[in-house]
Image: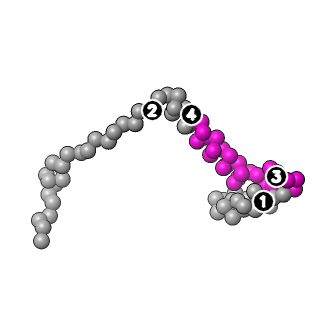
Amino acid sequence: MTAPRTVAAVQAAPARALPVPNLSVASAALWLSLTVLLAGLAYYFLGYDQGVVSVFGSDTHVHEFVHDARHFLGFPCH
């Protein structure tokens, strides 16, 4: 059976340094912009699109595809 670890033994363990990613301001801004755009589109289609955006006239495939997710997230529908 092994001896229990003491507080001194736990504190003596050195912490490993994680490498810092090298991101430029332009790269970070691009990633942030794309993430916000994708999140905005997802929020619109899940929360507000009630069949308004239809590719083929009165087709409601987008509405029906996200219907259950809309209710699960608490958005009213119909």
Q: Nearer the viewer, residue 14 or 59?
A: 59
Q: Specify few, some or many for label 3: CA neighbours under 10 Å numbering under 14, 14-19, or 20 or more.
A: some
Q: Is residue 50 left or right of residue 30?
A: right
Q: Which image quadrant is residue 5 in?
A: bottom left
Query: In the image as oriented, which residue stretches furthest toward the bottom?
Result: 1
The amino acid type of the residue labelled 1 equals His
Let me know if residue 48 is in the magenta part.
yes
The amino acid type of the residue labelled 4 equals Leu
The Cα–Cα distance between marks 1 and 3, rounded to whole angstroms, is 8 Å
Q: Which one is earlier in the sequence, the residue at label 1 or at label 4?
A: 4
Q: Residue at x 58, y 42 (%)?
A: 35
Q: How many marks?
A: 4
Which residue matches tag 4?
30
Q: Residue at x 26, y 44 (%)?
A: 16
Q: Specify few, some or many for label 1: CA neighbours under 10 Å numbering under 14, 14-19, or 20 or more.
A: some
The amino acid type of the residue labelled 2 equals Leu
Q: Are marks 3 and 2 in contact (CB under 8 Å)?
A: no
Let me know if residue 43 is in the magenta part.
yes
- Horizontal and vertical percent for residue 64? 75, 62
Give the SS element for disc 2: loop
Q: Which image quadrant is residue 4 in?
A: bottom left
- Horizontal and vertical percent for residue 62? 75, 56
Which residue matches tag 3?
54
Which numbered disc covers residue 23? 2
Which residue matches tag 1?
61
The Cα–Cα distance between marks 1 and 2, rounded to whole angstroms, is 39 Å
- Horizontal and vertical percent for residue 22? 41, 33
Q: Are marks 1 and 3 in contact (CB under 8 Å)?
A: yes
Q: Which one is earlier in the sequence, the residue at label 4 or at label 3?
A: 4
